[in-house]
Amino acid sequence: MTDRPNRKMARAVLLAVAFILTAVTASLCEEAQFLKQVPDTFTAKEPVSFYNRNNLYEYIDGQAVFYNSYGFTRLEHGVYQKGGGTYTVDIYELGSRLSSFGSYRQQREEEAKLFSAGVEGAIIDYLTVFYKDKYYVEIIPMSGGDDDTGAMTLLAGWVDSILPGSKDLPPELSLFPPDGLVTRSERYVDESLISYSFMGRGLTAVYKDPGQERELKLFIAFTPGPDQAGEIFKGFQSKMTQTQHLTIGGAEGVKGELPYRGPSIACVSGSYVYGCMGVSDEKKATDRLTTLGEHLKLFGK
């Protein structure tokens, strides 16, 4: 009977070792979903590797938080060679079509040229990005070749052809009124809309009117339900000074001064909180919010 504790300890150690071996084996046996083949005219320089939420920091330490904020679940990482050039291909699986759109718009270089890949793509000599459905793709030259732009274009076309899903814009973008909307100014975040943590996830878009120096920024916060929307509306109102209540398109609203953002307006209706910041022309701002409120009422029906 004296060896019973030792037997229990040995059994516990064996179970722990078995658990670790199972986890390691699962990791080693993980297979590529998309980078199974090698594109024509390229060679694979190393095996495809994989990352999840727990170890993404091992690959991109400083940016792991950014992708995790967009509902990141999995990354496939491939390295390919063509001539003297070496290129990485990273396919990020994110939380939704809006998430991949948001990641793309945040990561795209402003001076990059648009090109046809996925829903929308952009290319510059040191970076190619595009998104398709819930996937965001980055292609980066690690060592220069004879034609990096041409090589990245080929890789982007190949990845686009093997990724599943829709090549349509997220339908939520159609909520914004088109009049005065700055092309491709829409942005999406999965958390901390307009840099307020309590606002949660949502969209923004920029408007510019002739003769106006100040840009108007519209926003939409998506919430789980009316109760949460009401709390967010109260939180937004608490950030304002010189507030005045009003009704816009039948929705409860408030206007006032928002620190560092100027004259602002917010409305609440159903599960949505929406509004604008940087108001120069209040009539145009309220007209746009009225239209936005009407679009929100119809959205999803």
Image (cartoon, rainbow, N blue to C red):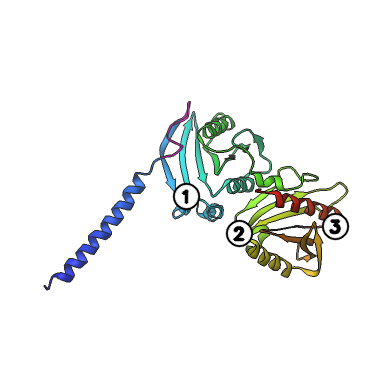
* Alpha-carbon span between mark 2 and mark 3: 30 Å
Query: Seen from this angle, which residue lies furthest left?
Result: 1
**Pair 1/2: label in front:** 2
Write down the region rendered in magenta: 32-42
- Give the x, y percent position of residue 281: 86, 55
Residue located 82% across and 57% down the image: 279
**Pair 2/3: label in front:** 2
Query: Vertically, is 192 above or below 33?
Result: below
* Alpha-carbon span between mark 3 and mark 1: 48 Å
User: Answer yes or no: do the residues labelled 3 and 1 have beta carbons within 8 Å?
Assistant: no
**Which residue carries the number 1 mark?**
59
Mark 3 vs 1, N-terminal side = 1
**Pair 3/1: label in front:** 3
Judging from the image, what secondary structure is the residue with disc 3 in? helix
Mark 2 vs 3, N-terminal side = 2
Mark yes or no: residue 185 visible.
Answer: no
**Which residue carries the number 3 mark?**
282
Residue type (three-letter) at the residue carrying disc 1: Tyr
Q: Residues within 10 Å of mark 1 (few under 14, many from 20)?
A: few
Query: Seen from this angle, which residue lies furthest top?
Result: 41
Give the image quarter of residue 168: top right
Residue type (three-letter) at the residue carrying disc 3: Glu
301 is within the stretch colored magenta:
no
Give the image quarter of residue 113: top right
Mark yes or no: residue 117 visible.
Answer: yes
91 displayed left or right of 198 = left
- Label placed on residue 224: 2
Q: Nearer the viewer, residue 267 or 206?
A: 267
